[in-house]
Image: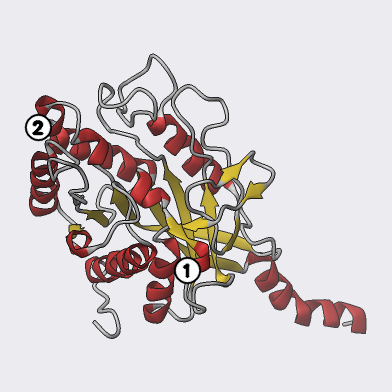
Amino acid sequence: MKLKNLTFFLLMPFMLFAQTKKDTIRVYYLGGQSNMEGFGYVKELPDALHKKNNKAFIYQGNPVGDNDANGGLGKWGVLQPGHGTGFVSDGKNNTLSDRFGVELSFVQKLQEAYPNQKIAIIKYARNGSAIDSSGTKLYGSWEPDFRRVKNQYDYFLKTVQAAMAVKDINGDGVEDVLVPSGILWMQGESDADKTEQIANDYYDNLKRLMQLIRAAFRNNDLPIVIGKISDSGDNELGKIWRFGELVQYGQEKFALTEPNVSIVRSTSKYLYSDKYHYKSEGYIDLGKEFAKAMLFLNHQKPKNY
């Protein structure tokens, strides 16, 4: 055998390995309304979170009201502060804001359990949005069967489909295999302040939406962690959400009766920066609590629990 043929023969297994090498990345979806979008202040982050996380990546869909062609546009980037309210994307460039949500501490806590794995976040959340189509006109609806205009559910699908279609999310030349690993949902306030009927329907609406979100990731048993809504009590009546208890009941019922679902209740102890949104430390804690619940659903006990 000629030397060059022998060299090619010996190198061929390594060439084939290089061609087939892929990175497996856990991906989690974050959805809901303003307390998922995030109203924490970047300037108030501790040093451990006030930086880029080079082993984690995020694709955030542009959050807009219903019937806006720019809804759901996004681009993969390294996880860092600035993916809270005020974040904007045109699909080519991401413009970070001075706010953050649960994504930073959520990923940090997951990385304690999965230190050698890359993690990705797909986020689409819209401030003020309700599930019920009659719940909000200005901020948008998640109702899957509402077809008169493009709505929040459509932008969710647009975000997920575009994010999952990218074969190399970090641009390192190695194909990435995104493995859907869980759903976080923080929403319900905008279904709790309109009518008693809308609040009573929350369980059914949530169940239907979560079934379809799971289906979008092609896993009908994908773990779901929901955050229980709370009330600042910051008005003359001492109650912001008139029918908040009914929505809370729907959330508890969903967590109790649906498989592979958990609920985070730590929101009841958080302090508020205004009538509707937690202070920065609340978002940090909520991200950690979401991660702990998700790890238990994945049969992985978190450290320092």
Q: Position of residue 73 (x, y in %)?
A: 57, 38
Relative to 231, 141 lies left or right: right
Relative to 268, 145 lies left or right: right
Relative to 140, 78 lies left or right: right
Q: Position of residue 293 (x, y in %)?
A: 24, 67
| Nearest to N terminus: mark 1 or mark 2 | 1
Q: Nearer the viewer, residue 139 or 151?
A: 139
Is there a contact, CB below 8 Å, between mark 1 and mark 2?
no
Q: Residues within 10 Å of mark 2 (few under 14, many from 20)?
A: some
Relative height, residue 15 to residue 57 (above, below): below
Residue at image coords 23%, 41%: 188
Residue at image coords 39%, 63%: 280
Q: Amino acid at mark 1?
A: Glu
Q: Residues within 10 Å of mark 1 (few under 14, many from 20)?
A: some
Q: Nearer the viewer, residue 220 or 262?
A: 262
Q: Nearer the viewer, residue 182 or 218?
A: 182
Q: CA distance from mark 1 to mark 2?
A: 37 Å
Q: Position of residue 181 (x, y in %)?
A: 36, 60
Q: Amino acid at mark 2?
A: Asn
Furthest residue in direction front, as rendered: 236
Q: Position of residue 10 (x, y in %)?
A: 77, 82
Quadrant including the C terminus: bottom left
Name the image quarter holding residue 89: top right
Q: Which residue is mark 1?
A: 44
Does dot 2 land on a helix, a strand or a loop? Answer: helix
Q: Which residue is mark 2?
A: 200
Does dot 1 land on a helix, a strand or a loop? Answer: helix
Residue at image coords 52%, 25%: 68
